[in-house]
Structures are given as C-alpha cells and as structure tokens.
Image: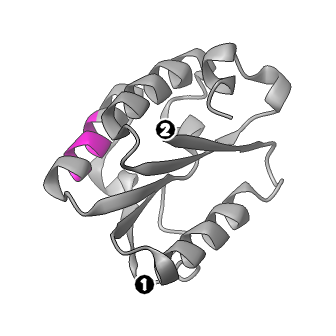
Amino acid sequence: MINLIVGGKGSGKTKKMIDMINASAKTTPGNIVCIEKSMKLTYDIDHAARLIDVDEYKINGYNMLYGFVAGILAGNYDIVEVYLDGVLKLGNHDLDGLGVLLDELAALTGDSIKMVVTVSADLEALPESVKKYL
C-alpha cells in the first residue's frame, strides 16, 4: 500500500512524515524504515525507526532506488512501514518515471507493507500514473 504526501517546497510534507513515523514508532509492532537523501532527520525521528541515507550508497535514479528498497525488504521480513522522503530528488525530478517507480513499489510491497512517499510537486503537475496513489 503506497500513500503520497504531495505539495510544493516548504508545504510541510516532511514534518507530516516525521509525525507519522514518530506516532507509528510507539504503536507498530514491526520495523520502520525511513529512507532519505542526507541525514537531516537524524534528531527528528524516533530512534525505533531505522534511518537510511541513500547518499551513503550512491543511489541515483529510480531503478537504483527500486533495487535498494527491494534489497532492504529482502533482508528484513519484519519491516511493516517504509517512509521515503524527497523521491523526486533521487529521480532527477522525472514525474513520468515516478509513476513507473510507484507501480513497481506497489507490486513489491503489496498490502503487507505501508509505504509513504513525499513528492515535492504541485498536485496539478502530477501525471495520472502518480495521482492514482493519492
């Protein structure tokens, strides 16, 4: 299950995601993973959530990101929630490619893993392939 948090820069997407992570960390019985570009959330999210910096692994592009997420999920079957912050930064702001990535991630996670993705774009700019996850 994929949920999007959409809005322009500075609209509070990351803050909303942080609140969701911290609330889940108190109640979710499984593991929570937060994937971001840089480690700016280090002091904002609960220590129970695992924070991963994609810059450490030289992730660039949606194909690499998909493989990275698949590897994380394959390595730990106890993951129940995945949060992905700033996905457009990783995919060079390719909105059509984002639709393909979301389809692939939806197939990977199914209904057993909750995935929340922040998208820094106006709702009107999103293609239908992305809007279907709103």
Sequence-first tag of 2 and 1: 1
> Magenta span has 70?
yes
Q: Nearer the viewer, residue 103 or 68?
A: 103
Taking 68 as reference, is 5 left or right? Answer: right
Q: Quick check: 49 above or below 131?
A: below
User: What quarter of the picture does the C terminus occupy?
Assistant: top right
In the picture of the structure, the residue carrying the numbered disc 1 is 47
At a point 68% along the width and 15% down the height, the residue shown is 128
Q: Is residue 61 visible?
A: no
Q: Secondary structure at mark 2?
A: helix
Splitting the image into 4 quarters, where does residue 79 fall?
A: bottom left
Splitting the image into 4 quarters, where does residue 123 fall?
A: top right
**CA distance for labels 2 and 1:** 24 Å
Q: Which residues are magenta?
A: 67-72
Q: Nearer the viewer, residue 127 or 55?
A: 127
At a point 33% along the width and 69% down the height, the residue shown is 31
Q: Secondary structure at mark 1?
A: loop
Q: Is residue 111 visible?
A: yes
Splitting the image into 4 quarters, where does residue 108 fall?
A: top left
Residue 49 position, x and y percent, is 41, 74
Given the image, on which type of amino acid does mark 1 rest? His
User: Nearer the viewer's eye, disc 2 or disc 1?
Assistant: 1
In the picture of the structure, the residue carrying the numbered disc 2 is 90
